[in-house]
Amino acid sequence: MNDLWVLIELEAEATRIEKLLAPSPAVVILGSRQVGKTTLADAVVERRRSTYLGLESDPDRANLAEPKVYLAEHRHEHLILGQIHHTRSCCGRFAASSTRGVGRAAGAVAS
């Protein structure tokens, strides 16, 4: 597959995710390892006000230690969580906080 075709496909998928985000606070990107989930999430970040947290990173995981506070601080943007399989403990607290009117909680989740 040539690079131009890959770029066209990436842009099409990023557009699709943006449409899915319009009525919904969350979109999940699932796929096998190394298929471009994070690259796709990065393409969405470039198009809209978003913050990406890679949960393989200790500092990024620490941002979600107090999810209500973090979500309130970022309520006007989409939050993209990457590498979510690196942590299980924050996900329940994050999900609970995101449904309690804190704001637009999650953009896309790349795992």
Image (tube, rainbow, N blue to C red):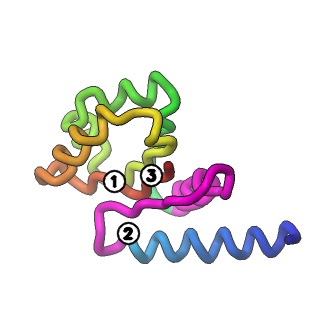
Find numbered disc 2 in the image and state the secondary structure of the residue it sits on: helix
- Name the amino acid, label 1: Ala
Pointer 1 or 3: first along the chain: 3
The part of the chain drawn in magenta is 21-47
Viewed as shown, does residue 20 lie left or right of 76? right
Residue furthest right in the image: 2
Q: Which residue is mark 1?
A: 106
Residue 94 in magenta stretch: no
Residue 41 in magenta stretch: yes
Q: Quadrant of the N terminus?
A: bottom right
- Name the amino acid, label 3: Ser
Find numbered disc 3 in the image and state the secondary structure of the residue it sits on: strand
Q: 111 or 62: which is nearer to us?
A: 111
Disc 1 to disc 2, C-alpha distance: 9 Å
Q: Nearer the viewer, mark 3 or mark 2?
A: 2
Q: Position of residue 21 (x, y in %)?
A: 38, 69
Q: Which residue is mark 2?
A: 21
Q: 30 or 104: which is nearer to us?
A: 30
Disc 1 to disc 3, C-alpha distance: 9 Å
Q: Position of residue 100 (x, y in %)?
A: 11, 51
Viewed as shown, does residue 51 lie left or right of 47? left
Q: Position of residue 65 (x, y in %)?
A: 28, 27
Q: Which mark is residue 50?
A: 3
The answer to the question of whether label 3 and label 2 lie on touching residues, with beta carbons closer than 8 A, is no
Are there few (<14), some (14-19), or many (20+) residues within 10 Å of tag 1? many
Are there few (<14), some (14-19), or many (20+) residues within 10 Å of tag 3? many
Q: Nearer the viewer, mark 1 or mark 3?
A: 1
Q: Residue at x 40, y 29 (%)?
A: 61
Q: Position of residue 49 (x, y in %)?
A: 44, 55
